[in-house]
Image (tube, rainbow, N blue to C red):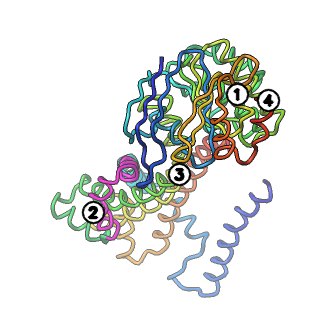
Amino acid sequence: MLNIDITRKKYAEKEILQDIRFSLKSGEFISIIGPSGCGKTTLLRLISSLDNDFEGSIDIDRDTIGMMFQEPRLLPWLTVRENIAVVDKVGDQEEVLKLLRMVGLEHTLNTYPKNLSGGMARRVSLVRAFINRPKLILLDEPFVSLDRPTSLALQNDLMLFCKSFNPAVILVTHDLDEAISLSQKILFLGGEVTGNIMTHINENHCFDTLYPTQVEVIKENILSLHPNILEGKL
Amino acid sequence: MLNLLYLRVGSVFFLIALWHVTALLSDSPMLPLPVNVLSSLIEHISSGELLHHLGITLYRVAMIFLIAMPLGIAFGLLMGNFKKIDAALDTLLVLGLNMPALVVIMLCYIWFGLSDVAAILAVVINKVPTVIVNIREGVKAIDKRLIEVAYIYKVSRYKMLFVFYIPQLYPYIIASARNGLSLIWKIVLVVELLGRSDGIGFQLSMFFQFFDITSILAYSFSFIIIILLIESFIFRPIDTQISKWR
């Protein structure tokens, strides 16, 4: 069980996050969505303890976190195998190979990152995030700047890993489609304008309980760029 | 590849040819013919005296290199990473960088006597600041995003240093090793000339007093050959090995 309770986070005297409270069980998948600059990535950095300067408390086991960033962030001087093995306490090579096989990359074991395509590099980064069987996976827009088919394939791989290893997952994204199809809960970060709104997604990938007033608020303030998506899913 | 080799060798031959012609035209004892320098070199080698002094100088160069590089890298890493350490040592660093080599050598000889320890210490003091400056710049250029990966996965300190930091600094380390070697051996000769009774610097001062230009050139060449060997059989292979991912 992960408990997150952030009262306030300031950045250069500006308040960017306030009153964010939610908890997460293993196997649960929550997406955090909001316009750019609303503090999505900052929130993820607080949870991952890359940034510890905030008011509030985050109660998680920080020893087992896996993370994917907006870029694959592989070390160019290490092979795929070595890149995955930078995570401490990685078991034998069989384990690395097993996970690579799950995403169809077993042949790249001794390849350097410069010889991987963008999609392949992200899949390696996905394997690295899961190799240590973490209880919590943090995803910072991992599908951004990929073409549609590659992005969908990567989402499939992600769900396959989630089913196999059952971690709690927090995904930061600006793509509502992505959020609805992957997660059980969505947290809309509205900041001062609207407050933050937590919604549930049911098995049919629809919003479970969303009050009409909330819909209005989300449409107007958060998804002003593409309100039709919200309409369609309701 | 082959063309590049021709260029490398060709430039050396051109220099020797130019020297030969100039020496022939000037016809002066101030500029001996290349072939005379070569025979002098062979003579010094076969008498055993050149190898003896060369060995001593190389030993000093190696000692200094092995002390100065790790020291410079360690302080460069510290100063690049920690603002407080940087603030504390920065003025000292500027001082060290601009302290005339000759002054350091004299002070070391006066304070520690005309010994090998003083000689080695003097060159180390001259060399370390330049390594620190290089590595500190390298640390500033480090990709912080990769270091975040290391934090997320809680890698050990050993891994952080040798897997995440040092590889990003390789270009800076290799560069300071290269110009480090050249700086070290230049200063070592001065140190030997001023206060040792062996080594190439000492021999050169003897030849200088006798105006033996042929021997001076022969000794210089013996050292240049060694440096070229180090470059081709140590630095370049290491460079190729660690850049194979590029």
Residue segment shown in magenta: B74-98
**Amino acid bearing label 2:** Leu
Viewer-proximal residue, A108 or B228?
A108
Q: Are marks 2 and 4 in contact (CB under 8 Å)?
A: no
Determine the chain carrying the residue at label 3. Answer: B
Residue bearing the label numbered 3: B174
Residue bearing the label numbered 4: A152
Instruction: Indicate which disc residue A6 carries.
Output: none
**Amino acid bearing label 4:** Leu
- Counting labels gives 4
Residue bearing the label numbered 1: A110
The secondary structure that dominates the magenta segment is: helix
Evaluate whether label 2 is on the same chain as label 4: no
* Mark 2: secondary structure: helix
Determine the chain carrying the residue at label 4. Answer: A
CA–CA distance in space, label 3 to label 1: 26 Å
* Mark 3: secondary structure: helix
* Mark 4: secondary structure: helix
